[in-house]
Amino acid sequence: MANIAALLKQEITRIVRKELKSETELLKKANARYRSEIAELKRRIAFIEKQLKAVERQSSKLAPTTTVAQEPDGKIRFRADGLKKHRERLGLSAPALASILDVSPQTIYNWESATSRPSKDQVVKIAILRKMGKREVQQRLAQMRAA
């Protein structure tokens, strides 16, 4: 009887190994497929990142340089003395600058003396003004007078 039990045990072990082998084979194939898909995705990400860097470099070359000081989070900084110096550099009076920015001359004086601060919309207008040169500003003033 011990002989039959040993044979039965051997047969069961053989069948279990055969079943386990077929199950693990499927898992190995799936694992290999997933690894190759992951490798392909990594290659695509690397390629896309290279393209992005190239586009950023190209756009930074094409973008005009600005003299507006920006904080790291992208906000535009405003400095009262900076506005006054830029106004003087452009050769503008406070009323002329006020007409360009669509505010009163007193507002310009208040900004320059740091008794008040411009709103966010006004700061954006000031940033645009800082990108302009003397000729552009004079042309804008002439257009405003003509209109």
Image (cartoon, grey):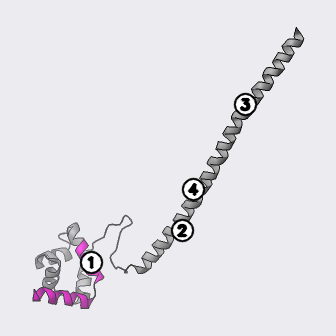
**Can you give x and y, in whole percent of width and height, for residue 65 in the image?**
37, 80
Which labelled disc corresponds to residue 108? none
Tell me the SS state at disc 2: helix
x and y percent of residue 59 in the render?
43, 75
Q: Earlier in the sequence, mark 3 or mark 4?
A: 3
Residue under label 2, please give it. Answer: 50
- Residue 111, image x, y percentages: 19, 74
Q: Which mark is residue 128?
A: 1
Mark nearest the camera among 4 and 1 is 4
What residue sits 71% from the left and 38% below the top? 25
Indicate the amino acid at tag 4.
Answer: Leu
Extent of the magenta region: 124-147
Image quadrant where residue 66 sits: bottom left
* Pointer 2 or 4: first along the chain: 4
Residue shown at the point (88%, 8%) measured from the top left: 1
- Secondary structure at badge 4 equals helix
Residue marked by disc 4: 41
Marks 2/1: CA distance? Answer: 32 Å
Q: Are marks 2 and 3 in contact (CB under 8 Å)?
A: no
| Residue 131 forms part of the magenta stretch | yes
First in residue order: circle 2 vs circle 1? 2
State the residue position of label 3: 20
Report the side of 103 relative to 36 (left or right): left
Amino acid at pointer 1: Ile
Q: State which tag comes first along the sequence, 4 or 1.
A: 4
Task: Write the residue at 47% across / 75% down.
Answer: 57
Residue lying at the far right of the rendered structure: 3
